Amino acid sequence: MLAITSLLDAKHTALVNTIIQDFEKEFGLKQVQATPEPHVTYLTTDALDINLLKNYLERTSNCHRVFHIYTTGIGVFPGEHPVVYIPVLRTQPLNKFQSALFKDISKLSTETGNFSQPKIWLPHISLALGDTTLDLLTPMFKYLAQYDFNWEIPIDNLTIFKQSKDKKAFEIESEYAFANPILT
């Protein structure tokens, strides 16, 4: 399985990594570190041909300018091991971008993730997942209350994450910078 993502800029990567490192020190949580860098995921895919996918992402990146995403608050995907995340607001440019990626990459794939469908996609930046417990939510939220999560983040890349051979982590397969660095 592959994930089509965008890495965050240096400033927001540092902020997210500080939280993730503090979660490990304070609560013993480290499973979110199975992904190499903080990011926003657009979709997951079982691509038929990774070279076709890479060519598509390179062409797409060459046609796009930097755009901004906006975050606010904290969210939780419930369950036995809740996922704690920073919600990314769905703006028209972000929706259009993700929808085009989904449409085009679906044609190159045997399968795309259920939650990648444009109507139900919920963009977010994960802070903790997999090794969380319900009992940890209250102290985690007390810790997170010190932060203002009203962020504006420039997005300037498309990045493929692939599962490691042992399927316990992800690694960066390739990264494509947007060709035009002018902010829109």
Image (spheres, helix red, strand yellow):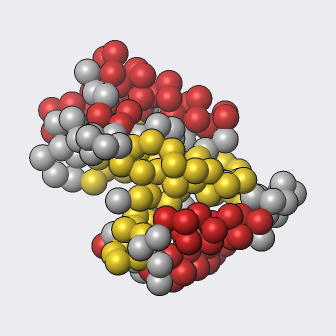
Residue 97: x and y in percent read 62, 73
Q: Nearer the viewer, residue 143 or 115?
A: 115
Residue at the spot x=54%, y=81% of the render?
A: 104
| Residue 5 visible at all | yes
Tell me the quarter of the picture where residue 96 sits: bottom right
Residue at the spot x=16%, y=39% of the render?
A: 134
Q: Locate the C terminus and report the quarter of the image it occupies.
A: bottom right
| Residue 86 visible at all | no
Residue at the spot x=81%, y=59% of the render?
A: 179
Q: Is residue 33 left or right of residue 151?
A: left
Task: Tell me if residue 153 comes above or below residue 32 in the rendering.
Answer: below
Task: Tell me if residue 79 comes above or below residue 123 in the rendering.
Answer: above
Residue at the extreme left: 80
Q: How many marks?
A: 0
Residue at the spot x=31%, y=17% of the render?
A: 26
Residue 180: x and y in percent read 84, 60
Task: Tell me if residue 134 comes above or below residue 45 in the rendering.
Answer: above
Q: Locate the N terminus and report the quarter of the image it occupies.
A: bottom left
Q: Nearer the viewer, residue 44 or 89?
A: 44
Residue 81: x and y in percent read 18, 44
Q: Is residue 161 left or right of residue 9?
A: left
Residue 105: x and y in percent read 50, 76
